[in-house]
Image (tube, rainbow, N blue to C red):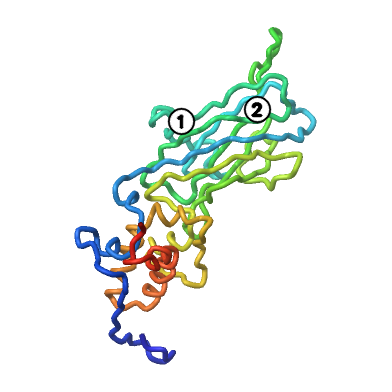
Amino acid sequence: FSNKKSDKALTTFQVWFDAGQPKKELPFLLQYFGIPKMPYMRYENTLIIHPLEARFKFPRGYKGRNIFAYIRIYEKYDRSCFETEKPLKLFNNGKSDFYTTRYQYHVEHPYFNEECVIHLPIDLPLTSILKVDFIHASLKKDSKQIRQLCGTAICPLANLDGSFISEGVHSFGISFTDTPTEKIEPTDSNRFTFEVIWRSSIYTSSCTIASLYKGKIDIDHFDITQKNLNALITHLYPVLDILLEKIGAGQKEAFELLMKILSFFKEDRNKKNGRRK
């Protein structure tokens, strides 16, 4: 490539890999790099939510000691549509629009130990939110209201840059209004905590990959590290397809990004004959 800032034209280049004899029966990059084969072999599109804990700072008029939660996902949920928007049927293999946690008796700060599996559509919008309603269930026979809303957590699933909520543990504040539509900042005494696990060939928590899917290459905000490498592994083959196409079209940034990605597999290149034993 030309190093002159004023020269936007790209010169012809060649790349050599001293990796011994390639295995011709494998796809080209697999001949030289120990790239995992798994993403190429299967498709999945699942989001897993592990509810962990809920802590409440109840205002006057609210109470909760026998608590369970309804978990729902909406394409959009704000003041313009909260009365009419219906939750998506993504639970129980698309048969239900909500997930119900286990009921906990006489516990003001419930801890959860369950797995909520969400089968996602292929067109989930960036406006999607996770809505968790906490319900107090009365056990008194003379109770006027057997089930009473005692708090709601609103959790956006996507970011403005096109990426989705990252894997790991997240906390969102709990609201105590009848019609909550916005997320609340968490505190030590008022929060819902849950873990996110992605198993999706479509959606990514990496803004680098999300930008690439939009046709853009953002070297300055490269966010892939050894810790979140799984976000790359899951999308590795479509990412490589896009980069190689852009390299063929003469885009310098695509080659730079490819080198950054291949740097995560340098151990394989340094082994004898370029392959792991």
Report x, y in % for residue 17.
Answer: 31, 74
- Quadrant of the image containing the C terminus: bottom left
Return the residue found at the far right: 60
Badge 1 amino acid: Asp
Q: At x 37% / y 49%, what residue is drawn? A: 201
- Residue designated by label 2: 149
Residue 258 lies left or right of residue 85; in this view the side is: left
**Quick one: label 2, few (<14), some, or many (20+) residues within 10 Å?**
some
Which image quarter: residue 24? Answer: bottom left
* As drawn, 187 above or below 101: below
- Residue designated by label 1: 97
* As drawn, 156 above or below 112: below
Report x, y in % for residue 175.
Answer: 68, 39
Residue 82 lies left or right of residue 247; in this view the side is: right
* As drawn, 135 above or below 20: above
Name the residue nearer the viewer: 165 or 125.
165
Q: Secondary structure at mark 2?
A: strand
- Does label 1 or label 2 sit earlier along the sequence? 1
Badge 2 amino acid: Leu
In space, the residues marked 1 and 2 are separated at their CA atoms by: 18 Å
Residue 214 lies left or right of residue 107; in this view the side is: left
Name the residue nearer the viewer: 19 or 42.
19
Report x, y in % for residue 109.
Answer: 72, 30
Return the residue found at the far left: 25
Which image quarter: residue 273? Answer: bottom left
Label drawn at residue 192: none
Residue 28 lies left or right of residue 50; in this view the side is: left
Q: At x 61% / y 21%, what residue is drawn? A: 103
